[in-house]
Image: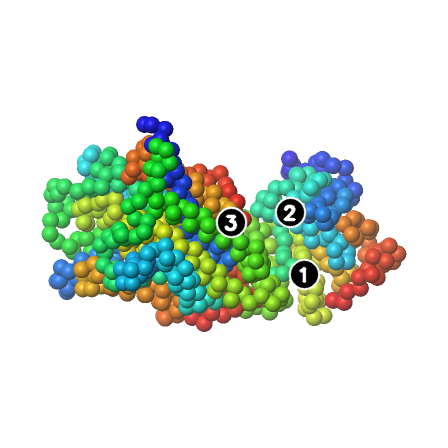
C-alpha cells in the first residue's frame, strides 16, 4: 500500500472529521447550554440535506449558494423545536430528565417518518452541482472537490462559532451555561438565550448538511449514522467544549478512515466505538469536558 | 395503639398489589380461550412478551432511574445464547434461556461498571453507543452467522424445547409465565432494601450517603436484574419466532420498544409496563400493518407523535389515570426543598 | 481495636477522660478561603457538646469533616481510636456517626416510615426488621401519628424530627445535629430540646452546631467556640458566656434567631 494512498485516505478522513466536528459542535452547544441532549440531531442534518436537494431540484440553486438559506431555515427549525417542545419539557417537574430524552427521541422518529412520507425511502443524491464530479489533485493524492469544500466550509463555520462565542451574545450564552438560575438577576432573558442557542445549534448542523449533500447519499435514515458519530465525538471531546468537538471530530474522522483502510470498510465504525469505550473508562468527561 | 401494631400503608399496599396481580394473572390465563383468532392470539403473545421485557427495563430505568436506550443488547445476548446452545450443543431452550439470562446479566454489569459514573444523559448515550457497537459486531461475526442470523430447526413438539408446530396458545402461557415472573421480581425488588435505596438515591444522593447508602453497588444490582430478565425474554422470543438475526436481536427499534411501554404506561410503577404494552403493541402492530406497509412513513409519524405527546402531556404515564403513584418522581434537577415540594404536589395529585 | 466494653485504646492522648471523638489539629481550606485552622478538641462519651461561633467561624466545615462529607487538609479525627478523617460519609455512618442537615433533606417522594427505613437499612438487610426498627425510632421521635404521611407534607419542625429519626435509625454512637433548633417557635424549641435529651439518655453522644448561643445554653454540657476558623475557647456554657473574647467575637456579628 503506497504512502500516497495512505495519505489520501488520511486526508479524506480528516476532511470528514471536520464535518463531524461541526455536527458535534451543534450538539455540544445545546447540551452545554441547557443539559438537554438533542436525540433528533441527526434528523436535523437529514432535514438540511433534503432541503438542499429540494431547492436544487425545484429552483436549480446550487448547494453552495444555498448555504445561507438553509442555515437560516434550520435556525428557524431549531427555535421552533425549542419553543414548541423543549421549553415545555423543561417545565415538567416530574421526572424531567426522562421527558427531555423521550421528547427529542419521539421527534427523531417523527421526522424520519415525515421524510419517508414526503420523499420516499429511496436513496437520492445531487449529481449535477458545481462541486460534483470534480477532483483536486495534490501530487499523487486525488481528493473529491466536494469533500475538500465540505471540510473547508465546516472549518470556517467552526471559526464563526468561536467568533460568536466572543460576542456579547456568546458571553450571555456562557453565563447562562455557568449558572442557569442566576442570569435572570443580571438581566439576561434565559428563554431568549435558549431559543437562539437552539437556533445556532441547528444552523451549524444545517451547514454541515448542505455540504454533505454534495457528495453523500440522502435518505430518511441518513441522520442516524451521523448522530451516533456526533454523540461519540461530543463524548470524546467533552460536552460543552467547542475545542473538544473540533479535536475529537478530526480524530474520529481519521480513525474511521484508517480502520476502513487497514481492517475492513464495513467495520470502520468499530474503531470509533473502541475509542469511545476507552474514553469512558479512562476519562468519562472527555478530553475537555466539564462533567 | 402504637404505630407498630397496625398494618401501615406499605403493608396494605403490598397486599393489594399481590391480590390484583393474582386476579390479573387468572384473567390473562383465561382470556385467550374463547378467542380463537390466530392473529389476536399472536398479538397477545407479543403484548405479554413486551410487558415482561419492559418490566425488566423498568427495574433499571424506572426504579433505579438509569435510562437505558440500548436494552436490546441484553435481549440479543439472551436470544443468541439460547439459539446457539440449541443449534450447536442441542441444549433445550428451557435451560438455554437461563444461560442467556445469566450472560445478559453479566453484560449488564460490564456495561454498568464504567457507565454508572456518568450522569443521566451521558449514561443514555453510552447505552445507545454500546448497543450500536454490539449490533455492528454481531452483523459481521461469522461465528453467529453474521447478518444471516440463526434459524431454530424444528425437531418435535415439545414443552422442554418450547416448540409447537402450529399452535400459538402454548406460547401465550409461556409468555404469560414470563411476564408474571418479571412482575413478581419487580414486586419483590421494589419492596426490598434495594427498592428503598434506589428511591433514596434518586431523591437526594447526599442524604442517602449520610445514611450509609452505597450508590454504585445498588445500581449494579439493578443492572444485573434488569439485564437478566431482558435476556430471558430474548431467548423466549427466539423460540416463538424460530429465528434471530442481528437486526431483530440488537436493533435500535427494539431498544425503543423495550423501553417505551414502561415510559408510556408509567415509569417506576408495577403496572406501567403492562398497561403500556397493552396500548403500544396493538398500536404499533396495527399502524405498521395498515398504514406503514408500503414504507410510507405514516406509522413512524404516528409513533413519534405519540411518544412526544405522552412525554409532554402525561410524563407520569397512563397509570396515573388510575391513580397510581410512580416511584420515579424524585427527579429534582434544580434547588432543594422548594422545588421538591412542587414536584411532589404534582405526583400526589394522582395518588 | 475494640475490646469487650466497646472502648478502644485511644491512640492519641485524650484531653477529656473517656473520649468518643478526638479532633486533632484539623485544618481545611477551599482555595484561598480558610475554613478551619488547627482545631483540636475532644468529645466525652455521653455528653452533649455545643459547637458554636458566629457565621463564617468554620463550624459547618468542621461538622462535615467529622461526618465524612469533607476531608481535612491536615490533622486527623478519631472515633474511639479509629481514624475516620478522609473515609467518606458512607464509611463514617457505618462506623457510627449520624448526622442531620441544616437545610432538611427529606426523601420527598417517600413517606415518613419509608424515609426512616432507609436509615434502618444501614444496619439490617431484611425489610421486616428494618420496618420494626424504623417504627420504634419514629415513635421515639414523636412522629408516631404520621407514619404514613408523605415527608414533604410535614411541618418544618416535623421535618427536623424526621431528619433526627432517620439518622437515629442508623444506630449511631455519635449524632451530629446541624442547627436543629434554629428558627423554631419557643414551644417547638422546647420539644426539640426534650428530644435531644432523650437521645442522649439512650447512650448517644451528641454534637450540636448552632450559631445562636442562647438556644443551646440550657442544653449542652460543654461548648467549643470557633471564630474565624480557629478554636477560640472551650468549657462550660456559663464560662463561655462570660468569656470576653467570645463576647467580642459575637458583638461584631449579632444575630437574632
- Do marks 1 and 2 share a subunit? yes
Dot 3: what SS? loop
Q: Which of marks 1 and 3 is in front?
A: 3
Mark 1 surroundings: few (<14), some (14-19) or many (≥20) residues within 10 A = many
Q: Is residue B303 above or below residue A213?
A: below
Q: Give the labeled residue for mark 1.
A: C180
Q: Which of A217 and C111 is in front in this view?
A: A217
The reply to whether dot 3 and dot 2 touch (C-beta < 8 Å) is no
Q: Residue at x 28, y 50 (%)?
A: A217
Mark 3 surroundings: few (<14), some (14-19) or many (≥20) residues within 10 A = many
Q: Position of residue B145 (x, y in %)?
A: 21, 37
Q: Which mark is residue C70?
A: 2
Q: Which quadrant is home to the C terminus of chain B?
A: bottom left
Q: Where is residue C33 in the image (x, y as percent from the top left)?
A: 72, 49
Dot 2: what SS? loop
Q: Where is residue C15 in the image (x, y as percent from the top left)?
A: 79, 42
Answer whether residue A73 is visible to the viewer in this image.
Answer: yes
* Mark closest to the chain's N terminus, 1 or 2: 2
The Cα atoms of the two marked residues, 3 and 2, are separated by 30 Å
Q: Residue at x 57, y 58 (%)?
A: A167
The Cα atoms of the two marked residues, 1 and 2, are separated by 20 Å
Amino acid at each position: 500500500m503506497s504512502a500516497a494512498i495512505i495519505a489520501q485516505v488520511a486526508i479524506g478522513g480528516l476532511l470528514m472529521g471536520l464535518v463531524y466536528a461541526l455536527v458535534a459542535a451543534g450538539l455540544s452547544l445545546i447540551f452545554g447550554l441547557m443539559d438537554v441532549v438533542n436525540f433528533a440531531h441527526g434528523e436535523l442534518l437529514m432535514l438540511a440535506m433534503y432541503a438542499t436537494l429540494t431547492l436544487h431540484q425545484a429552483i436549480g440553486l446550487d448547494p453552495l449558494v444555498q448555504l445561507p438559506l438553509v442555515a437560516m431555515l434550520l435556525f428557524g427549525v431549531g427555535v421552533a423545536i425549542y419553543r414548541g417542545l423543549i421549553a415545555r419539557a423543561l417545565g415538567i417537574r416530574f421526572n424531567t430528565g426522562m421527558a427531555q430524552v423521550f421528547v427529542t427521541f419521539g421527534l427523531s422518529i417523527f421526522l424520519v417518518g415525515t421524510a419517508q412520507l414526503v420523499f420516499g425511502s429511496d436513496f437520492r443524491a445531487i449529481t449535477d452541482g458545481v462541486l460534483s464530479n470534480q477532483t483536486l489533485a495534490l501530487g499523487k493524492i486525488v481528493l473529491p472537490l466536494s469533500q475538500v469544500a465540505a471540510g473547508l466550509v465546516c472549518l470556517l463555520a467552526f471559526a464563526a462559532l468561536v467568533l460568536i462565542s466572543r460576542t456579547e451574545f456568546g458571553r450571555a450564552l456562557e453565563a447562562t451555561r455557568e449558572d442557569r438560575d442566576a442570569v435572570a438577576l443580571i438581566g439576561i432573558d434565559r428563554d431568549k438565550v435558549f431559543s437562539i442557542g437552539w437556533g445556532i445549534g441547528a444552523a451549524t448542523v444545517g451547514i454541515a448538511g448542505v455540504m454533505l449533500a454534495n457528495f453523500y447519499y440522502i435518505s430518511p435514515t441518513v441522520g442516524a449514522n451521523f448522530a451516533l458519530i456526533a454523540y461519540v465525538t461530543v463524548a470524546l471531546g467533552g460536552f460543552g467544549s467547542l475545542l473538544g468537538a473540533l479535536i475529537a471530530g478530526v480524530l474520529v474522522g481519521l480513525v474511521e478512515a484508517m480502520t476502513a483502510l487497514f481492517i475492513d470498510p464495513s467495520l470502520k465504525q468499530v474503531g470509533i466505538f473502541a475509542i469511545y469505550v476507552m474514553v469512558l473508562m479512562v476519562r468519562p468527561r472527555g478530553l475537555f469536558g466539564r462533567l | 395503639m402504637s404505630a407498630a401494631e397496625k398494618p401501615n400503608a406499605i403493608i396494605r399496599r403490598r397486599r393489594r398489589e399481590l391480590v390484583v396481580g393474582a386476579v390479573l394473572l387468572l384473567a390473562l390465563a383465561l382470556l385467550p380461550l374463547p378467542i380463537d383468532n390466530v392473529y389476536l392470539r399472536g398479538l397477545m403473545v407479543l403484548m405479554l412478551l413486551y410487558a415482561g421485557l419492559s418490566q425488566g427495563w423498568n427495574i433499571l430505568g424506572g426504579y433505579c432511574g438509569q435510562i437505558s436506550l440500548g436494552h436490546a443488547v441484553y435481549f440479543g445476548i439472551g436470544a443468541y445464547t439460547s439459539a446457539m446452545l440449541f443449534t450447536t450443543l442441542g441444549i433445550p431452550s428451557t435451560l438455554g434461556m437461563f444461560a442467556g439470562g445469566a450472560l445478559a446479566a453479566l453484560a449488564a454489569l460490564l456495561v454498568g461498571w464504567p457507565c454508572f459514573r456518568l450522569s443521566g444523559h451521558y449514561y443514555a448515550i453510552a447505552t445507545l453507543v454500546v448497543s450500536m457497537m454490539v449490533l455492528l459486531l454481531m452483523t459481521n461475526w461469522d461465528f453467529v452467522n453474521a447478518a444471516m442470523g440463526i434459524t431454530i430447526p424444528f425437531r418435535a413438539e415439545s414443552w422442554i424445547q418450547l416448540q409447537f408446530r402450529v399452535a400459538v396458545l402454548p406460547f401465550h402461557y409461556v409468555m404469560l409465565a414470563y411476564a408474571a415472573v418479571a412482575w413478581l421480581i419487580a414486586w419483590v425488588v421494589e419492596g426490598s432494601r434495594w427498592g428503598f435505596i434506589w428511591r433514596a438515591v434518586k431523591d437526594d444522593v447526599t442524604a442517602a450517603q449520610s445514611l450509609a447508602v452505597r450508590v454504585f453497588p445498588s445500581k449494579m444490582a439493578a443492572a444485573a436484574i434488569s439485564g437478566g430478565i431482558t435476556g430471558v425474554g430474548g431467548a423466549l422470543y427466539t423460540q416463538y419466532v424460530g429465528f434471530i438475526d442481528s437486526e431483530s436481536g440488537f436493533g435500535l427499534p427494539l431498544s425503543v420498544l423495550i423501553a417505551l411501554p414502561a415510559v408510556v404506561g408509567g415509569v417506576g410503577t408495577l403496572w406501567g409496563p403492562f398497561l403500556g404494552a397493552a396500548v403500544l403493541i396493538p398500536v404499533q402492530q396495527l399502524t405498521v400493518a395498515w398504514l406503514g406497509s408500503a414504507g410510507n412513513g405514516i406509522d413512524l409519524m404516528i409513533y413519534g407523535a405519540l411518544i412526544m405527546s405522552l412525554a409532554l402531556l402525561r410524563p407520569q404515564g397512563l397509570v396515573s389515570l388510575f391513580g397510581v403513584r410512580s416511584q420515579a418522581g424524585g427527579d429534582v434537577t434544580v434547588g432543594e426543598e422548594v422545588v421538591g415540594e412542587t414536584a411532589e404536589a404534582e405526583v400526589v395529585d394522582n395518588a | 481495636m475494640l475490646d469487650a466494653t466497646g472502648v478502644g485504646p485511644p491512640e492519641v492522648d485524650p484531653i477529656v477522660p473517656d473520649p468518643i471523638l478526638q479532633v486533632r489539629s484539623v485544618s481545611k481550606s477551599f482555595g484561598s478561603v480558610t475554613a478551619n485552622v488547627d482545631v483540636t478538641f475532644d468529645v466525652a462519651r455521653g455528653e452533649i457538646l455545643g459547637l458554636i461561633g458566629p457565621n463564617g467561624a468554620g463550624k459547618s466545615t468542621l461538622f462535615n469533616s467529622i461526618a465524612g462529607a469533607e476531608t481535612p487538609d491536615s490533622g486527623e479525627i478519631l472515633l474511639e481510636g479509629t481514624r475516620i478523617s478522609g473515609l467518606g460519609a458512607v464509611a463514617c455512618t457505618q462506623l457510627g456517626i449520624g448526622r442531620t442537615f441544616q437545610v432538611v433533606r427529606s426523601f420527598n417522594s417517600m413517606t415518613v416510615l419509608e424515609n426512616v427505613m432507609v436509615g434502618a437499612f444501614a444496619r439490617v438487610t431484611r425489610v421486616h426488621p428494618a420496618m420494626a426498627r424504623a417504627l420504634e425510632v419514629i415513635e421515639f421521635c414523636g412522629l408516631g401519628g404520621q407514619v404514613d404521611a408523605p415527608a414533604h407534607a410535614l411541618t418544618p419542625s416535623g421535618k427536623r424530627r424526621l431528619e433526627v429519626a432517620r439518622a437515629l435509625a442508623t444506630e449511631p454512637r455519635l449524632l451530629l445535629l446541624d442547627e436543629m433548633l434554629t428558627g423554631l417557635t419557643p414551644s417547638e424549641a422546647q420539644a426539640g430540646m426534650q428530644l435531644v435529651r432523650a437521645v442522649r439518655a439512650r447512650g448517644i453522644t451528641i454534637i450540636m452546631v448552632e450559631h445562636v448561643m442562647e438556644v443551646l445554653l440550657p442544653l449542652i454540657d460543654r461548648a467549643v467556640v470557633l471564630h474565624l476558623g480557629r478554636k477560640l475557647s472551650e468549657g462550660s456554657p456559663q464560662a463561655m458566656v462570660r468569656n470576653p473574647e467570645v463576647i467580642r467575637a459575637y458583638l461584631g456579628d449579632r444575630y437574632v434567631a
